[in-house]
Amino acid sequence: MRDPTVSSYYSPVKSTITTERMGAEANGSSSSLNFLIYGRTGWIGGILGKLCEAQGISYTYGSGRLEDRRSLVADLDSVKPSHVFNAAGVTGRPNVDWCESHKVETIRTNVVGTLTLADVCRERGLVLINYATGCIFEYDSGHPLGSGLGFKEEDTPNFTGSFYSKTKAMVEELLKNYENVCTLRVRMPISSDLSNPRNFITKITRYEKVVDIPNSMTILDELLPISLEMAKRNLTGIWNFTNPGVVSHNEILEMYREFVDPSFTWKNFTLEEQAKVIVAPRSNNELDATKLKTEFPEMLSIKEALVKFVFEPNKKTEIKG
């Protein structure tokens, strides 16, 4: 029996955003924008709503479950969005180790759900901004640690150490076939909200010990507004969604000590020692952000962005008597 939620006019021929809509949205007019956002209870999803409010953009949080096609179609019928944002997904609580023992649940949301949302959006010619992950690579002989040679958008993922990363790499490969999807590879996200337990800085300041490895990272305070602009420009394809360059754990904690807590101390341990206290290996890599930097030349390097968007706003000033 035919699924009634599948459009009768669906065609495998490449769908397009209508010229009229592209013209209206390309000029940046907030009145022509109407965003549908999935991930209301998540960190990124919550920030997206606040950004829309600040910019005067109409937005609605989706109520449908990603794996339930009928509920997604109902959301689209009700909201009639200009763009769709997917900030929903399973990362695991308190961390990705959860996914190792909840594989079906991880697949249901990260693979089945994301693909279903991409598919219903494609039927209607809607751009889907999909917040994905860059934790699908690890340093290798072609991209050695400290070389400055980052993985590019077209490179094939080489990290399958965690089930979470494995599902993310899987769905990214499949999404390449959806010309309406903008895949943003987020890594080790950081924001100025140092009380948020999902914040990479908050995490490592609470760990008993940390490794010290340079990595590409995403400063949400700078890059999430850029993602809204990407929607306005109807950009699609894969994007390394990180600030240019790399920063190590120790460099971040040194900044934390300098700007936030002068008495802060920490201990390091090796990857081998770390492996004994985690279930799944972690990804460490550098992503080449040239493509994003070319589109948004004002974007700051990772260390500059850390100071401007994270540590300066949290700087503790001495009170003089």
Image (tube, rainbow, N blue to C red):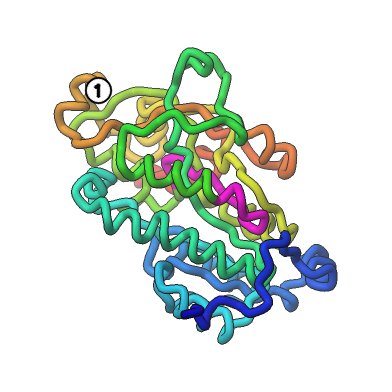
* The quarter of the displayed image where residue 29 is located: bottom right
Q: Nearer the viewer, residue 189 or 106?
A: 106
In magenta, the rendered stretch is 175-190
Tag 1: residue type? Asn
**Figure check: 305 above or below 236:** above
Q: Which residue is mark 1?
A: 268
Other-residue count near label 1 (Cα within 10 Å), few / some / many at <14 / 14–19 / ≥20: some
Residue found 60% across the figure and 47% down from its top = 176
> Would residue 258 be found to the left or right of residue 210 on screen?
right
View extreme (front): residue: 1
Q: Nearer the viewer, residue 271 or 269?
A: 271
| Residue 38, image x, y percentages | 47, 68
| Residue 4, image x, y percentages | 52, 83
| Residue 204, image x, y percentages | 29, 37
> Would residue 211 be found to the left or right of residue 307 on screen?
left
| Residue 203, image x, y percentages | 29, 43
**Figure check: 197 above or below 270:** below
| In magenta stretch: residue 185 | yes
